[in-house]
Image: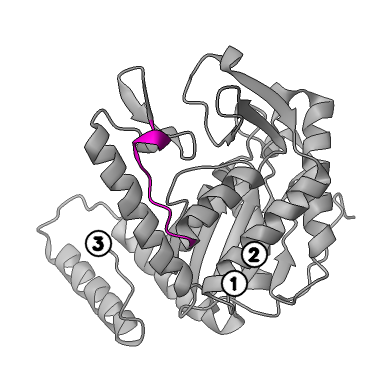
Amino acid sequence: MNFTTKIHLEKYNHPIDYNSSIMLLGSCFAENMGEKFEYFKFRNVVNPFGIIFNAVSIEKLIHRVVNKIVFTEKDIFFHNDLWHCFEVHSQLSNPNKEEFLSNLNAILELMYQQITSLTHCIITLGTSWVYRNNNSNEIVANCHKVPQKEFTKELVSIEENVKCIQNIISLVHSLNPDCNFIFTVSPVRHIKDGFVENNVSKAHLISAIHTINHQPSTINYFPSYEIMMDELRDYRFYAEDMLHPSQTAIDYIWIKFFENYINQKEFGTMNQVCEIQRSLKHRPFNPNSESHQKFLKNLNQKIFELKKNLPNIDFN
């Protein structure tokens, strides 16, 4: 007896392998997926400018990076003892203005170089709800705990989401026409917006992505939101806040992803990496014992053999 409805996925036409160069952008679920890529030692970079939830802000950053529009003093502001930028996440905020600008522009330059060599760009969109700064009339990526009265909350339409997504693709392809895109909608529920409002927000994102999904073969949709809402339709698959997917749910969605989006020829290597990762977490009772020294020797040999074929892999 089957107690869940399974979502059928077709094998991805441009599978990821250990020679792929991957960039993940978007919501906190992009970070969850990035952790999986990192664990299995794929070549990947995750959210260089921090977590960003909406398509408008992602497009704005990609436009800045591709056109090398450097950050200047007019792009930053001082609040609560830190310098912030409305275009990036608060994890980058800094008490030193010069250092902050230097860091932002260093990330911009590095991201430009990364885009030129990407094989896959995975974008996780979280919400269509955005905050517009009343002074600049610009949509922000992060409010940085600036009083809410300084912003106007609004819903990005399907049409505007479509335009942003198309612009993101066009901008990246202007530097790297061979880059493949995988879009997904975050399974995290933004209930602070309201239950109905959250569903409208997700519906706008899904509709926008599917408007362009039938276009170039370089664009694909991975249904992480649908897997969470349907296959994992139970609160036991949520974290304590009942909003974010639990680790079990993240693991399950990752399995669905790698089974269909990663080249099957890499599964053996992934098993080897997983075995090494488990061994690296081993904590001996006696580090100086003969048995542990033998264990370390075998482990180092496994890493050496793996690095002969994949020299970029690093377990440090």
For residue 316, which numbered disc appears in the image? 3
The numbered mark, 1 or 3, whose residue comes first in the sequence reads 1
Q: Give the residue drawn at x 63%, y 28%.
A: 131
Distance, label 1 to label 3, CA atoms, is: 34 Å
Frontmost residue, 221 versus 248: 221
Q: Quadrant of the N terminus?
A: bottom right
**SS assignment for the magenta stretch, majority:** loop
Frontmost residue, 153 versus 33: 153
In the rendered structure, the answer to whether residue 185 lies left or right of residue 246 reads right
Task: Using a 10 Å C-alpha cutoff, classify the residue at mark 3 as few (fewer than 14 neighbours), some (14 to 19) or many (20 or more).
Answer: few
Q: Can you give x and y, in whole percent of width and height, for residue 123 in the image?
A: 61, 56
- Can you tell which of label 3 and label 2 is closer to the viewer? 2
Q: Give the residue drawn at x 30%, y 19%.
A: 81
In the picture, residue 156 is in which quadrant? top right
Q: Is there a contact, CB below 8 Å, between mark 3 and mark 2?
A: no
User: What is the magenta range?
Assistant: 67-76
In the rendered structure, the answer to whether residue 306 lies left or right of residue 129 reads left
Image height of 301 relative to 137, above or below: below
Q: Can you give x and y, in whole percent of width and height, for residue 170 in the image?
A: 64, 66
Residue 51 shows up from this direction: yes
Distance, label 2 to label 1, CA atoms, is: 6 Å
The residue identified by callout 2 is 169
The residue identified by callout 1 is 173
Q: Can you give x and y, in whole percent of width and height, for residue 14 in the image?
A: 65, 79
Q: State the SS at label 2.
A: helix
Amino acid carrying mark 2 in the image = Ile
In the picture, residue 139 is in which quadrant? top right
